[in-house]
């Protein structure tokens, strides 16, 4: 552009004073890290006023950039481990912390900027090999953008956030705006751009809501999502080995004398179709706690002396999630529980802060769920009606009373079927359950529970599909009973003689077979799980004081880095206390002298002119055999290409520009 015609290096333009500090304060307020924001803002602005800087070498910048990468990797691993997929929001919120060492290296060094090669390993190798010229970047501008982006992870309303982000970005754009346009025109263009951005944002938001309902079903099938009280997708029909992890999902702290196994029920479902069970008509009702306590009574019980009591620790993925409970639970209590809700299917939701949740339960083995059966509990899908009828005839269910029918079904599976995690083959007509009952007679618990429920329904017995965990392993390390992901189980609930009872037809060896397939790394995983649980419980012990406590290690680490670099410190006096000027490549092009000469001779510079358009309009295409087109090509390569010009090409640009300048000096 014409305004860049000077031969002297252009002075670097920096964000307004205190702007970075203000952005850090806004970021801290948005993500609820006010104290950390104040500390980082103070450190950032202090570098401007100190009378000394560090003379950092290229290798020092490389080390700082590598340290930032390590901090980001640690934050990523920790947040995903603590919050699963929702950790992406915490990672976004902490981006300024990860990049902060780079900003400090810029502000506290004599260089006043960062070598671009410090940010990219591939570029670093090319620069060291002499294949590319080093280029520099000022971290202030991207850091402001990062603060604005990270603030979006907070709890501010959309209008407030958009206003703050607009102000933060507008402040830095104001410094680098093109001066030949008036401030009013620049402001109008900025407001117009912001308006278009907001309209696009609203459009995407509306589109998201439109497709959210249709996509939510597929998204929630992935393994990292919590149990859905309304729907569960089975692996019936999946080909290959069904393999669940050894990761500990549930911890139960109970006396060693407690009868085992402990069956923890999460939810039950009444409708079956295409491999999925659902209960779309579930209605959850909040249960009031006993006044002035954190005790929720689910059932009335007279003699509490016969109750069994245990503490359950589970990963609570979000504010409201399904709670695994023993059958016959009459009471839930614990200071971490905020609210308890229950559906007509006796599925229980607990509201609490996300993280490792601990609550206590009391139950009696002789108390069963009293939910009333519905029409769906007797429904058999049309595509399975024929095969269920054939198997029912084979068993002899016709005319049998409920108790006898249930016994026949249990005996049929125990005598004729085997447990297997491996499924082979193709299922024509998408009825893999038929293949299981009539041909292979091998499968995992989801096959057994589904087939049992449908057979009992054919016999006129209301039945449901239930999911949860079977707890039968004691961990000396945890000092608790544990249930792993591979201990997740499915079974059937049948309504006989006015009460719901559990019917589990899966062969009993399933637990040992799962244990035999355990990973060789299970002990290492258990140690990591134990340490993670200890830290999570430590966080829960005083949430207000130690939330995100690892983040507070960043300022001391930065101070340690500065102390280690003290040997590179040198005092700067007079003009040296100001931030140095960075020579911008290509501004020494002699064509700028030609444009200056023409302007002094009275040639008018039009609004929006570039150097090329100005020269093409006002000078000849060729002078003494030197073509203007060739000089412009060399100029722009010298100005913008990372490889620059060869020595011969640089002499050609210098000589040709001098000939043009002499030509128009003589004309003048």
Image (cartoon, rainbow, N blue to C red):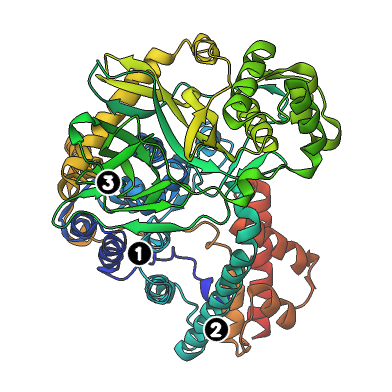
- Residue 77 appears in view: yes
Say which residue appears at 65% left-offset and 66% top-offset: 657
- Circle nearer the N terminus (1, 3): 1
- Circle nearer the N terminus (2, 1): 1
Location of the N terminus (image quadrant): bottom right
Q: CA distance from mark 2 to mark 1?
A: 27 Å
Say which residue appears at 17% left-offset and 41% top-offset: 541
As rendered, which of 500 and 17 lies closer to the eye?
500
- Circle nearer the N terminus (3, 2): 2
Q: Quadrant of residue 477?
A: top left
Say which residue appears at 50% left-offset and 15% top-offset: 511
**x, y percent for residue 365:** 34, 29
**Relative to residue 121, is residue 296 drawn left or right?**
left
Q: CA distance from mark 3 to mark 2?
A: 65 Å
Q: CA distance from mark 1 to mark 3?
A: 41 Å
Q: Which numbered circle lies on residue 300?
A: 3
Q: SS of the residue at dot 3?
A: loop
Q: Quadrant of residue 559?
A: top left
Q: Which residue is mark 2?
A: 192
Say which residue appears at 43% left-offset and 35% top-offset: 265
Does residue 277 lie above or below 340 as drawn?
above
Q: Quadrant of residue 628?
A: bottom right
Q: Nearer the viewer, mark 1 or mark 3?
A: 3
Does residue 357 lie above or below 165 as drawn?
above
**x, y percent for residue 61:** 36, 40
Q: SS of the residue at dot 1?
A: loop
As rendered, which of 507 and 529 lies closer to the eye?
507
**x, y percent for residue 322:** 42, 44
Q: Which residue is mark 1?
A: 155
- Residue 55 appears in view: no
As rendered, which of 143 and 439 lies closer to the eye?
439
Q: SS of the residue at dot 2?
A: helix
């Amino acid at each position: 552009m014409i305004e860049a015609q000077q031969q002297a290096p252009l002075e670097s333009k920096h964000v307004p004073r205190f702007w970075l500090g203000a952005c850090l304060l806004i970021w801290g307020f948005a993500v609820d890290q006010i104290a950390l924001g104040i500390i980082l803002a103070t450190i950032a602005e202090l570098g401007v006023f100190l009378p000394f800087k560090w003379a950092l070498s290229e290798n020092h910048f490389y080390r700082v950039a590598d340290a930032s990468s390590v901090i980001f990797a640690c934050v990523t691993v920790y947040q995903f481990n603590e919050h699963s997929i929702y950790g992406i929001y915490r990672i976004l919120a902490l981006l300024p912390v990860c990049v902060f060492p780079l900003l400090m290296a810029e502000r506290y060094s004599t260089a006043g900027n960062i070598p671009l090669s410090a940010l990219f390993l591939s570029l670093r190798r090319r620069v060291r090999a002499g294949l590319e010229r080093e280029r520099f970047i000022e971290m202030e501008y991207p850091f402001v953008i990062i603060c604005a982006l990270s603030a979006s992870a907070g709890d501010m309303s959309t209008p407030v956030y958009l206003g703050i982000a607009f102000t933060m970005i507008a402040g830095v754009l104001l410094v680098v705006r093109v001066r030949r346009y008036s401030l009013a025109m620049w402001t109008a263009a900025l407001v117009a751009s912001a308006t278009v951005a907001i309209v696009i944002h609203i459009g995407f938001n509306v589109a998201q809501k439109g497709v959210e309902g249709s996509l939510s079903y597929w998204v929630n099938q992935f393994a990292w999502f919590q149990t859905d009280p309304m729907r569960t997708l089975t692996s019936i029909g999946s080909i290959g080995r069904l393999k669940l992890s050894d990761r500990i999902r549930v911890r139960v702290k109970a006396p060693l004398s407690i009868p085992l196994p402990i069956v923890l029920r999460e939810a039950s479902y009444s409708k079956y179709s295409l491999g999925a069970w659902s209960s779309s008509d579930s209605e959850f009702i909040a249960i009031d706690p006993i006044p002035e306590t954190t005790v929720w009574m689910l059932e009335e019980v007279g003699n509490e002396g016969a109750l069994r009591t245990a503490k359950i620790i589970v990963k609570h993925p979000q504010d409201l999630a399904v709670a695994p409970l023993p059958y016959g639970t009459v009471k839930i209590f614990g200071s971490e529980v905020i609210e308890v809700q229950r559906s007509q299917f006796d599925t229980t939701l607990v509201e609490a802060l996300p993280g490792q949740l601990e609550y206590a339960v009391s139950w009696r083995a002789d108390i069963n769920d009293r939910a009333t059966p519905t029409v769906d509990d007797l429904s058999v899908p049309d595509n399975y009606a024929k095969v269920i009828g054939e198997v029912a005839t084979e068993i002899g269910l016709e005319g049998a009373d409920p108790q006898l029918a249930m016994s026949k079904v249990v005996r049929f599976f125990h005598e004729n079927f085997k447990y297997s995690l491996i499924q082979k083959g193709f299922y024509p007509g998408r009825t893999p359950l038929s293949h299981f009952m009539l041909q292979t007679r091998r499968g995992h618990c989801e096959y057994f529970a589904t087939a049992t429920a449908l057979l009992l329904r054919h016999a006129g017995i209301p039945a449901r599909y239930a999911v949860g965990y079977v707890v039968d392993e004691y961990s000396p390390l945890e000092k608790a009973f544990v249930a792993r992901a591979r201990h997740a189980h499915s079974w059937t609930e049948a309504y006989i003689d006015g009460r719901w009872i559990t019917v589990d037809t899966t062969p009993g060896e399933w637990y040992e077979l799962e244990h035999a397939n355990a990973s060789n790394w299970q002990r290492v995983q258990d140690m990591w799980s134990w340490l993670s649980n200890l830290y999570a419980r430590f966080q829960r012990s005083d949430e207000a004081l130690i939330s995100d406590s690892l983040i507070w290690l960043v300022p001391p680490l930065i101070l340690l880095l500065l102390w280690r670099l003290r040997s590179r410190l040198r005092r700067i006096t007079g003009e040296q206390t100001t931030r140095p000027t960075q020579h911008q490549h290509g501004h020494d092009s002699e064509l700028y002298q030609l444009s200056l000469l023409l302007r002094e001779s009275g040639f008018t510079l039009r609004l929006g002119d570039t150097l090329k358009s100005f020269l093409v309009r006002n000078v000849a295409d060729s002078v003494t055999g030197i073509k203007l087109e060739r000089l412009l090509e060399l100029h722009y390569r010298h100005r913008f290409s990372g490889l620059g010009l060869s020595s011969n090409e640089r002499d050609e640009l210098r000589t040709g520009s001098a000939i043009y300048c002499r030509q128009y000096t003589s004309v003048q």
